[in-house]
Amino acid sequence: MELEWQEIGYDSKDMERIAHDGVNMYVEFLTGRCYKYPNLPYEIFQRILNKEVISKSEGKPSYGATLHQLVIKGGYKGEQYK
């Protein structure tokens, strides 16, 4: 299955792009590291794209803050694949 990547690097300090295949979410960081988050609901992926969480350091909506709050603190474990 070909992933449809959402390019977000223009508006993120850490993340280059993200994708969801209906079951798993994939995140590529500006550092070159890539992670797969198995069994992550599509709704969470959409919420990241909507930048629903305010960054504490910048005081504005952030992809990274949303990823951290909903995915990392939500207990989803990423598997580095690159």
Image (tube, rainbow, N blue to C red):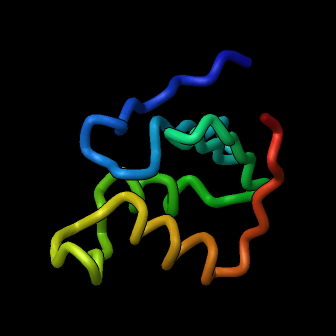
Residue closest to the far top: 2
Q: Residue at x 82, y 39 (%)?
A: 81
Q: Is 76 rendered above or below residue 15?
A: below
Residue 18 point in image, percent of width and height: 52, 39
> What is the tally of numbered marks visible in this picture?
0
Q: Quadrant of the N terminus?
A: top right
Q: Is residue 6 left or right of residue 26?
A: left
Residue closest to the far front: 31
Q: Is residue 21 left or right of residue 64?
A: right
Q: Nearer the viewer, residue 11 or 36?
A: 11
Residue 47 point in image, percent of width and height: 39, 61
Residue 53 point in image, percent of width and height: 32, 75
Q: Residue at x 29, y 56 (%)?
A: 50
Q: Quadrant of the C terminus?
A: top right
Q: Residue at x 66, y 16 (%)?
A: 2
Residue 46 point in image, percent of width and height: 42, 53
Q: Is 59 rendered above or below residue 12?
A: below
Q: Residue at x 42, y 32 (%)?
A: 6
Q: Is 36 rendered above or below residue 74?
A: above
Q: Nearer the viewer, residue 17 or 52?
A: 17
